[in-house]
Amino acid sequence: MLLFGIPADKDASGRAALDDEGIVQQAVKLAKRTAPNLLVITDVCFCEYTDHGHCGIVHDKTGRVDVDNDATLELLGRQAVSHARAGADVIAPSGMMDGMVGSIRDALDGGGFQHVPIMSYAAKYASAFYGPFREAAESAPQFGDRRSYQMDAAADPGQALREVELDLAEGADIIMVKPALAYLDILRSVHDRFPGVPLAAYNVSGEYSMVKAAAAQDGSTSGASCSKRSRPFAAPARAS
């Protein structure tokens, strides 16, 4: 199970993400009480928690509003430790901040959670395929977009390999490519370049929606059959 959270209140810095009694932390505890052997993964990011919908603290130091990468790293570490305290089995940072894996690894180790692995969204492309999820999670950016920190679809495939290599060097245990269906070539390249490294493929909401829409339109596509082979694994949790 991969958990995302929608807090009751949002602010500019996403403070609700750091609350040990926050929505994801509560969901983790409930899941582990209900099914102790269930593998619980938590998304570590701020886009669902900020009122502006970006993946970290924003600033205008360069003359335009953008995410402050370095200021966000310390908060990602705090969020990860809070999830680990709640009982998360795997931490999954998705914000594509430079240095996020290293900062989170340091924070987890310093908090006594050396055993908790990191599944990094290492090659995460900016994509319209995230649209349905962003609507459900109320996390669409309120201004601009995320192309300054997510990967460019037009970039050479070598960029994805460099991103993966950097995250592995910082301590990532599992590597993810997202969206999966649209970047099967990247999945293959990562698999070939880093044999033996656990590789996750995230089939996102827009890809899943295409299957459902095709099945509903004329019945020529078996929605149930295709869904079994291309199923997203996100479970949003919402605060009341």
Image: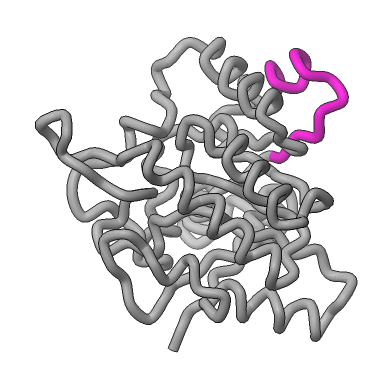
Q: Quadrant of residue 26?
A: bottom right
Residue 214 appearing in the image: no
Nearer the observer, 91 or 238:
91
Q: Position of residue 56 (x, y in %)?
A: 37, 49
Name above or below for residue 26 compared with residue 146: below
What's the residue at 66%, 58% (across, down)? 233
| Colouring style | one colour
Side of 11 where 84 appears, left or right: right
Side of 52 where 80 appears, left or right: right
* Residue that sits furthest to the front in the current view: 110
Q: Quadrant of residue 81?
A: bottom right
Name above or below for residue 25 compared with residue 57: below
What's the residue at 80%, 84% (across, down)? 33
Q: Position of residue 179 (x, y in %)?
A: 54, 38
Q: Position of residue 171 (x, y in %)?
A: 71, 33
What's the residue at 31%, 30% (across, down)? 148
Name above or below for residue 197 compared with residue 193: below
